[in-house]
Image (spheres, rainbow, N blue to C red):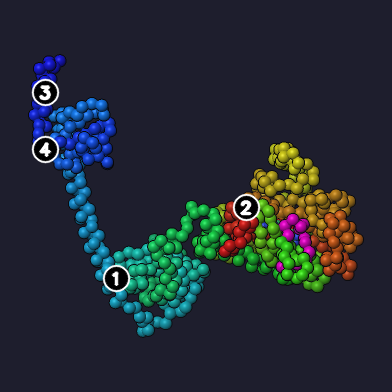
Amino acid sequence: MASIVDKVAEKVGDLSLTGDKGPEVYVDEEKGSDEKGAGTVAAPYATAVHAMTVKGHDINILTRKKDAQEYQPITKSALKNVKKTVETNERKSKKAAEEAEKNAKTAAEAKAREERRIEESKKIVLVEDSSLPKPTRSKIEGLQPLREQRVRVFGWVHRLRQQKEMTFIVLRDGTGFLQCILAGRCAQTYDALILTTESTVELVGTVQPVPEGKTAPGGHELIVDFWRTLGAAPGGDDAFNNRFNEQSDASVLADLRHLTIRGETAAAVLHVRAAVLNAFRTTFVKHSLTEVTPPCMVQTQVEGGSTLFEFDYYGQKAYLTQSSQLYLETCLPSLGDVFCIQESFRAEKSLTRRHLSEYTHLEAELCFITFDDLMTHIENIICETIDVLLSDPRMAELVQMLNPGFKPPKRPFLRMDYRDAIKYLNDHGIQRPDEVTGEIGDHVIGDDIAEAAERQMTDQLNVPIFLNKFPKEIKAFYMKPIPGDPKYTESVDLLMPGVGEIVGGSMRIADMQELLKAYKREGIDPEPYYWFTDQRKYGTCEHGGYGLGVERFLAWLTKRWTVRECSLYPRWMGRATP
Ligand code: 4AD
């Protein structure tokens, strides 16, 4: 144990070390502050390391641990540690400063080099070489037969990679993608240096198959010998790639739909959509249905008043059409079986992933048929349309890209009576809230099966289902009651896994008196329907038809989460922009 004498000696040694070497600097470990302090009694520092860093090595540090204590000269050992730390810090800062200076120099040199390069680039003017073979103007999809030849293409810079001596562009023109290589003078022009994605360009060059082992869209690339920018897209903060990304808020993506449709997935869905409409038309024509174009502005309702868009222009009540069905019925005596592909409008009050307020409605009407014929027809049209679509290799590829593993559905589709569906739901514990009490319970006959329950059942069975013969009271006024079972109707919904209902159809009341009774029962004024009623007066026939929601069909086919992805500019409650 150290004696009193030793301790005194140590203290004296300490004092002699700090002595009166320099100005006094005060450190209060409890109340001092390195940020606000000045090293004085009134404003002490908090650490000795800071004191030495700021005031230099030749100082006389007086410290105290607690505010209430007297200041004491710093001990010898503490001072040693402080010095060590300060010296280490000083070495580090010196090194960092040297590094920063070196970096700044390198950056300045690079900037100067870049500026020289830009200045040089401005002197390079590309001229189309007229001594070369004349290029053939082509869309990207038409390049295969033009391999090894000079071509001229136009499009948008979909992707861009700039290397020192080369610029790689993936060009997009709506018909496909093309890898383009700019080398030599082509990559040295000012336009090449400042090129941005989504700029429009004109490129002339030779189409070459890609070297063995490499891949590119179409299996070839364009070796460019002349090019120019037609419309430069902005860079920096306003650059296309900075406007949105996959994580952007859904409302931002909806506002920017005009830009998001340039993306590969969105464009693929729109390409498939166009081909689906063509394929349906081909199939309808093959089945001797004639296309008609009924009006969108109407004065009659088809599917109930709650979803009608009403407007006042004609000085009489008018609506945007909910369905062209009634008009199609009037075409039967004129043209025979008919179809239309027309926008329908529904003022839907709920926001679901399968409801739009404007959607593309594909409807058909057939005369002299039975209910069974109707279902077989729907099944044939859908399956044949898918066959037509997939016989185009590009569409087969896009469908597989969007919905990997997609297989066309097998015929015949499962036919399920509404009453059996209610039993299925109850047997499988798929319940619903009671309309009045809100209590969860079993389904009962008469229920309008809700979207969630319907989808659960469809997903469990995982096949297309013709859910048919719904009760009269939950269906539209025009539906034909089942002969001998008049509380139920010859009606059918086609349910698809993942989406639910994509088709709604029925046989129609063919008898005039029966139709007049139906108007009365539903409280519909027959007057505006005079033309519809006349169909029953001048040569009636058993007939039926259906409507297919094109966006729902696409959501099923391309496995999209919502129908909003399947519409060019989707509209739903609260959204009519852009
Ligand atoms: O079942 P719905 O209401 O039937 C009719 O309109 C009949 N008049 C059609 C006819 O027989 N000609 O609608 C038919 C289909 C639905 O199965 C669904 O696919 C789609 O139209 N549909 C909608 N799609 C998107 N958004 C909405 N709000 C839709 N409402 C119906």
* Residue type, mark 4 in image: Gly
Give the labeled residue for mark 4: 22
Q: Determine which quarter of the picture holds residue 402.
A: bottom right
Q: Nearer the viewer, mark 1 or mark 3?
A: 3
Q: Which secondary structure lies at badge 3?
A: helix
Residue 96 left/right relative to 551: left
Q: Is residue 164 magenta?
A: no
Q: Pick whichever of labels 4 and 1 is earlier in the sequence.
A: 4
Magenta residues span: 295-308
Residue 205 visible to the viewer = no
Alpha-carbon span between mark 1 and mark 2: 51 Å
Residue visible at 36% across and 68% down in the picture:
194
Q: Amino acid at mark 2?
A: Arg
In the drawing, does residue 401 fall left or right of residue 187?
right
What is the CA distance from the residue labelled 4 to the residue labelled 3?
Answer: 21 Å
Q: Position of residue 188 (x, y in %)?
A: 31, 71
Q: Residues within 10 Å of mark 4 (few under 14, many from 20)?
A: few
Tag 1 residue: 118
Determine contact: label 4, label 3, CB under 8 Å: no
**Residue at horizontal 26 percent and vertical 29 percent from the top:** 67
Q: Which residue is mark 3?
A: 10
Chain-order first, disc 4 or disc 3: 3
Cα distance between the residues tagged 2 and 3: 83 Å
Q: Looking at the image, tell me whether mark 2 or mark 4 is earlier in sequence order.
A: 4
- Label 1 residue near ligand 1, CB within 8 Å: no
Q: Which mark sits nearer the N-terminus, 1 or 2?
A: 1
> Which quadrant, please, contains the C terminus?
bottom right
Q: Which residue is mark 2?
A: 353
Tell me the SS state at disc 1. Answer: helix
